[in-house]
Amino acid sequence: MEICTCQKCKSFQFTNQDGQQIQGVLVSRSPRNRHWASASQTDGCGMHISTRISISEDSSNNNSQVSSDESDSSHSSSTHQTTASELTKATLSFMAWLHLSCEHSHQQSRLARQYLEQLIQSFQPSKIGIDVTKNLPVDIRTICKRLQLTPQLEKRICCPKCYCLYDSDLSAPSECRYKYFSQSSPCGESLFTQHFIRPLPQLKKDSQHFTKATNRLTLSKPHSTYITQDFLKWLTWFIPQVEDSID
């Protein structure tokens, strides 16, 4: 039902669901269009029907209607943000599951993101779908970080013989210095291995410097590494808000 406020109907009033007095008559769309067509013919204005439709209320009703519209607008905006946030989180979680559980590569993850973006735009052509697709990272590593799925790990150099640990920085010795006893000799096991870097074919062709075995580039890498995670950081990640609950 719609409100008709033509020349004849505007002299009537009715009470809406909120108990407010509204000027006009509740009719269906077809009778309302006929009323305005008849009114335009009688007054000779020739104005389009849609431009003549208006709801006339007194000042008190206008104030209450404005406040009602503002509350509806704020509620609609809040609902929109909640829906977009939930849909974004669900999409990111699904992409992380594809990468971590289904072992999708980075290239496959980017392809899956494109498919999901098209699906969201097809089923959510409104502003919600636009907001969701704009907030989808391209790189799967960024997605894992946003979902806090990337742990903070501590990496240290490990001796392959005695398993002594050294900090993974430039201060680490080339050979293990651990002593089983204060008077015993050091372990002496090499902590690093040398890897030769093969030059690119074009670079090898243009420069004879890289063709000589004595001048080949090398890269030092640890024989083995020991990776750990701080227990308190792991506990904070594994059980969110556990500290607040204990306190």
Image: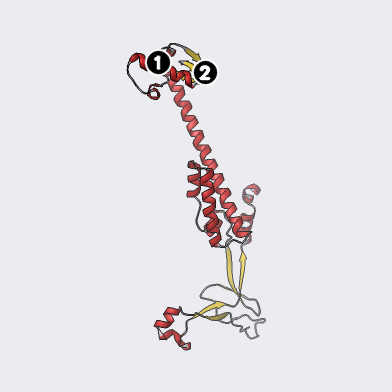
Query: Height in image: 47 above or below 154?
Result: above
Query: Height in image: 147 above or below 205?
Result: above
Q: Quadrant of residue 101?
A: bottom right
Image location of residue 188, percent across then percent down: 61, 84
Q: Secondary structure at mark 2?
A: loop
Per the rendering, the mark at residue 16 is: 2
Residue situated in front as seen by the camera: 188 or 207: 207
Alpha carbons under labels 2 and 1: distance apart: 26 Å
Q: Secondary structure at mark 1?
A: helix
Mark 2 touching mark 1, by CB under 8 A? no
Q: Amino acid at mark 1?
A: Ser
Residue at 48% x, 34% y is: 74
Residue at 47% x, 13% y is: 13
Residue at 52% x, 45% y is: 122
Q: Amino acid at mark 2?
A: Asn
- Look at mark 1 in the image and give the residue it sits on: 38
Work out whether residue 67 can be spotted. Answer: yes
In the visual, does 176 lie left or right of 26? Answer: right
Residue situated in front as seen by the camera: 121 or 75: 121
Per the rendering, the mark at residue 24 is: none
10 Å neighbourhood of mark 1: few (<14), some, or many (≥20)? few
Image location of residue 117, percent across then percent down: 52, 50
